[in-house]
Image: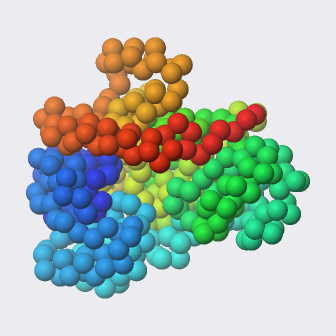
Amino acid sequence: MRVLITDGNFKHTLASVRSLGKRGVNVTVLSDLRLSVSFHSKYCSKGIFAPNPEHDTTFPEFVYDLVKREQFDAILPISYAAVVQISQIQERLEPYVRVPLPDKASIDLAGNKDKTMQLAESIGIAIPKTFYPQSRENAERIADSLSYPVVVKGARENGNVGYANSPEELMLQYEKISAFSPIVQEYIPGGGYGFFALYNHGEARAIFMHRRLREYPVTGGPSALAESIYDPVLMERGLKLLDSLKWHGVAMVEFKKDERTGEYVLMEINPKFWGSLELAIASGVNFPYLTCRMACEGDIEPVFSYKTGVKFRWLFPQDIFHAVTNPGILPHFFSDFADRTIHYDIDSHDIVPNILQIGMTVGEFALRIKQGRFWRPHGRPLL
């Protein structure tokens, strides 16, 4: 099997490359960075310098020309930007390569938080109280009537988010991301939970669930330490939402468990592979390999069971950054090194990518300090 993977510098791209390479899959990786961590994995058969799908509109044609020249069995877009750009040419690609993606309408709905929230509410899934200002004037109109803190998010799947503890802070946050059609939501206190699935044209073929134990930023962000769990209520919520979209391929449905009520409240759908992918693989659900097999063979046997209680830790940079910005957990940060049950993304048999990650962590720290977005980049909700 020959597989093409995008976004070579992402940690979950490296996880995919390793998981496929260990299965004997020939893996070609695209990246706009010549020092991309996945390029330097021994499981990467070939690295190709390519346009950045986040910023470069020539990316789809680059991919199209490449798959016409070379014989790939499947393509795995990793980032949301790559998913969107490849979905635009999916019909043109399909004569040459399998593309395990849903249709553009489903991707658009899942990638837009306003549409996602409206769909979830219509099928009985709990969401935060949500407001859709659509203009600065409307935001000002509702600001004085809200209970604080609130969360201001760009509707598009782009990471733009900020906390506001007053009407004045709300308007400041709104202005920061006004170009991304912000929505305003109540702040839900509680831990982060994820439901992950692989679908085959509307039918679930693999599932997984986890809870976040540490994350960066500490107010909400990618996992620094997470644990595999199984919760039938969480599963029912995730399946209900993806079933309604007749999903195809992989997706993550993110929830918070409201500490006031114990109810799972929807945060968003990520219509792509996710940052904590390695935990699922370590727990027995090899999503990259299952996705490629499903794409190439037409279907797979369902994978609905896995190991629970498995913990995975991402040191570079998430857990280090979490510890620096949340010194109270330093005793746990250090004692966790003695816990033999915790898995890491450090592979002694494929160490060069991890060495590169150390250098990139230093660079990321310096950049975040310079840009003033290291300590509490989204602000701090005051309860």
Q: What percent of the width, then of the height, locates residue 135?
A: 74, 71
Q: Against 21, is 200 above or below?
A: below
- The residue at the point 21 percent across, 42 percent down is 356
Give left or right: position of 248 versus 131.
Answer: left
Q: What percent of the width, then of the height, locates residue 5?
A: 25, 62
In the rendered image, which quarter is residue 165 located in? top right
User: Of residues 190 and 286, which is closer to you in this image?
Assistant: 190
Q: Residue furthest front?
A: 370
In the rendered image, which quarter is residue 351 located in? top left
User: Of residues 131 and 240, which is closer to you in this image?
Assistant: 131
- The residue at the point 28 percent across, 82 percent down is 61
Please count the marks in the image. 0
Name the quarter where the N terminus is drawn.
bottom left
- The residue at the point 62 percent across, 59 percent down is 176
Give left or right: position of 82 versus 289.
Answer: right
Q: What percent of the width, then of the height, locates residue 2?
A: 16, 64
> By what rule are the colours in the image chosen?
rainbow
Q: Is residue 226 visible?
A: no
Q: Against 331, is 152 above or below?
A: below
User: Of residues 38 and 160, which is closer to you in this image?
Assistant: 160
Q: What percent of the width, then of the height, locates residue 255?
A: 60, 46
Name the quarter where the C terminus is drawn.
top right
User: Of residues 117 and 23, which is closer to you in this image?
Assistant: 117
Give left or right: position of 7 versus 256.
Answer: left
- The residue at the point 87 percent across, 54 percent down is 144
In the rendered image, which quarter is residue 298 located in? bottom left
Q: Is residue 32 visible?
A: yes
Give left or right: position of 80 versus 360.
Answer: right
